[in-house]
Image (tube, grey):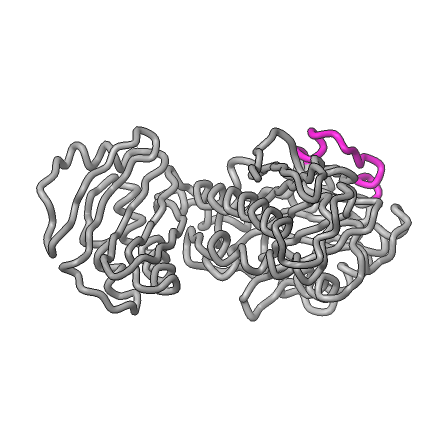
Amino acid sequence: MSIEIIPGSITAPTGFSAAATAAQIKYKGRDDMAMIFSKSPCTSAGCYTKNVVKAAPVIWDKRITGSDKPVHAVVVNSGIANACTGDEGLDICQKTAQAVSQELSVPVDSVLLGSTGVIGMQLPLEKMCAGVKTLASLLSTDEDAGHKAEKAIMTTDTAPKEIVCRAVIGGKEVTMAGMAKGSGMIHPNMCTMLAYITTDAAIDKKLMQEALSQTVVDTFNMISVDGDTSTNDSLILLANSMAENSFIGEKNADYEIFCRMLDTVCLHLAKAMAADGEGATKLVEARVIGSDTKENARILAKSVVTSSLTKAAMYGCDANWGRILCALGYSGVSFDPAQVTLTFWDDEKKEELLIYASGKGQVYSEEEATRILSSKHVILTADMHMGTEAATAYGCDLTHEYVNINADYRS
């Protein structure tokens, strides 16, 4: 069954609405607070940061998505992360959820929260509660409401990250939509990100959580911008059953379609984050093929995409293939360098260049290599000639602008 990518926003699935407002949490002159809402109760699933230091909203959300409680709303603010804020940070979560409960007549523990921005600052409770009141009054199922919600959760992002897809499941048209923010402090094992996925599918909670946990392995866990893992990473999936498809209660053909939809949404959002890395000028994919095991392929690909020297070479459009081979070599995976083949690929012009094989660099045109590496989407492929397994990691180049952004991020 085919999966169709369609125009839309997070409100595309039946029953979901969204809103955005300028609550002036930290930013001035722009929307910085968003809400997603479903009057019909949602089954939820979540994946969160692996960082030992977890922000208050992560602690709050994990408790709810880890239970059988239905979810109705998500409230997200940008500018302040509500991380390392002690008991006061958790108290603000509680009171923000209470404000949502009062405005929308839903249980307090059916409200999820998300925050992104500066660590260590306390959220202004009065502004949060005022923002909730405004958001509740602005909720709309219009596509534009979803676009505004997406833009409101951005921090250093330069472009919105959204996708909508649909497919037929159990004889009914099912829609799934995603929106995300993420540009810096991005590293595998969840990245520095907030991502929200809505769907009108009817599906068992345990199966939904299993599907979400599985899809992050080759999507969000395979991207890196700078090697730093955030305190706030959250990936939330909400399903409100309003498509009225045959309930997915076992791993059958309908479940496989659902998983493919989820893979499509998560991979799109993950690649969009990698391409929009702080200061980045290009998306860099590291593809490892011919590996002996899937896990080794992942390790090798991640090693290349996280190499600062390789990232700097990509910024300079410098065909310094030694840095790639070096990154493969210190990954911890054993291989014979003489068996490895390295190629560059320009995914815009569909041009390929062989740069390393049989244990040595190949004869190639530096001008051609520079032209290929000047693409907005560069693919570095390493064929290990050890087996049939493959994996891809997603990253970006390392630029002067990255330093500029992070040198004054708190100001």
201 above or below 298? above
**Which is the main secondary structure of the residues drawn in magenta?**
helix
Quadrant into which the N terminus falls: top right
Q: Picture coordinates of residue 54 (x, y %)?
A: 61, 66
Where residue 347 sits, quadrant-wise, is: top left
Left or right: 409 as drawn, with respect to 302: right
Q: Picture coordinates of residue 298 (x, y %)?
A: 38, 59
Q: Which residues are magenta?
A: 133-148
Left or right: 336 as drawn, with respect to 53: left
- Please report the residue visible at 62 percent of the width from the left and 48 percent of the height from the top: 258
Q: How many marks?
A: 0
Of residue 273 and residue 30, the one placed in the foreground of this image is 273
Left or right: 365 as drawn, with respect to 101: left
86 above or below 99? below
Of residue 248 and residue 46, the one placed in the foreground of this image is 248
- Please report the residue visible at 65 percent of the width from the left and 53 percent of the height from the top: 236
Where residue 170 sits, quadrant-wise, is: top right
Q: Picture coordinates of residue 326 (x, y %)?
A: 22, 59
Question: From this viewpoint, is residue 317 visible?
Answer: yes
Left or right: 235 as drawn, with respect to 72: left
Q: Please tell me whether residue 143 belongs to the stretch shown in magenta.
A: yes
Q: Picture coordinates of residue 371 (x, y %)?
A: 23, 32
Question: From this viewpoint, is residue 74 visible?
Answer: no
- Please report the residue visible at 66 percent of the width from the left and 62 percent of the height from the top: 58
Of residue 95 and residue 171, the one placed in the foreground of this image is 171
- Please report the residue visible at 36 percent of the width from the left and 37 percent of the height from the top: 377
